[in-house]
Image: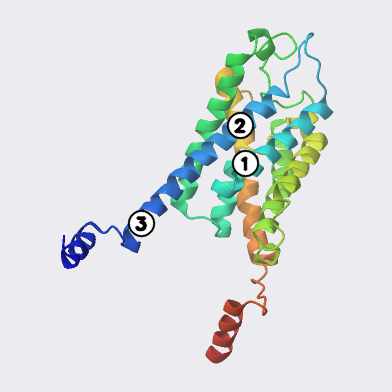
Amino acid sequence: MSQQKQKSQESKFGSNSPSRWRVQESHRVAIASFFGELVATAMFVFVACMGCVQTPFFGNSHFRSGLTFGLAILIAIQCFGSVSGAHLNPAITLAAWIYGVIGWLKAIAYLIAQAAGALIGYGLLVAVLPQDAIKGVDNPAGACVTVLAPEISELQGVFIEFLITCCLVMVACSVWDPRNKRFQDSVAVKFGLTVSCLILTAGLFTGASMNPTRSLGPAVWNNSWAAHWVYWVGPLVAGAVTSVVYRICFKGDEEIDLRNSNAQIRMIGEVVVQ
């Protein structure tokens, strides 16, 4: 085969075309992000909700459940943070969209992945544990189902979920802040400890969901819907409000490291433009 003919075929099939591979790579990344979010949410719900199981044969405590949730978040973020960002939570995804971290198409895809992941994760729990460990005398609503304490009204529950989710979303916004770009190595630990702290603080009052799909999975499998709307309204409103407030009032500009050659070129360009 002549060299000219070979070049003609390469041009025809685009074997070395950068644009061809760039399109395929973008599709691969999008698919990986979707399934990464799905698997991460399933992993989180399975591990965290298993830590909530309490029967006469399987002892448990509020402290242990709160710590388990934080460690489950840590595992999921460490595994899939580089794949999808490991939001695991529609409130975080909504905040990321408002903040400008992701686009609306990805936000919708993440919401679907999180809902499916929560259902799969809790379904695995139902499959591997005895039925009386999922729903019994000690947990009539079902294991890991978020319910309000008897003394807490639905309105109080909404405000509690709103306030603790504000704290969680504030941590997320600070991580997305360009000024913290260089401090990303311990994000999983930060989120894990934040979740554990908030659950230990508010878990006895509302279950400290802070996550609509985390509440959705157990509710669907156990058909337990008492005050379920609280766990959607509180966190989602908190995600929207906190991200707007942080973006307007606290978000900083990207820091430029002048030791980097690209940064130097950018700085020179900005000076020329000004």
Compute the Cα span from label 2 to label 3.
Answer: 32 Å
Q: Amino acid at mark 3?
A: Trp
Q: Amino acid at mark 1?
A: Cys
Q: What percent of the width, then of the height, locates residue 227?
A: 64, 27
Lower position in the chain sequence, tag 2 or tag 3: 3
Q: Amino acid at mark 2?
A: Met
Residue holding disc 1 = 79
**Element on which disc 3 rests:** helix
- Up-down: is 113 above or below 134? below
Residue 208 visible somewhere in the drawing:
no
Q: Quadrant of residue 193?
A: top right
Residue at image x 47%, y 49%? 106
Q: How many marks?
A: 3
Q: What percent of the width, then of the height, locates residue 270?
A: 56, 85
Lower position in the chain sequence, tag 2 or tag 1: 2
Tell me the number on the disc at residue 257: none
- Residue extending farthest to the front is 1
Q: Quadrant of residue 259?
A: bottom right
- Up-down: is 114 above or below 49? below
Tell me the number on the disc at residue 43: 2
Residue at image x 74%, y 42%? 192
Marks 2 and 1 close (CB-CB < 8 Å):
yes
**Element on which disc 1 rests:** helix
Q: Quadrant of the C terminus?
A: bottom right
Side of 109 where 187 appears, left or right: right
Tell me the number on the disc at residue 21: 3
Compute the Cα span from label 3 to label 1.
Answer: 26 Å
Comparing labels 3 and 1, the label whose residue is closer to the camera: 3
Q: What percent of the width, then of the height, locates residue 241?
A: 64, 53
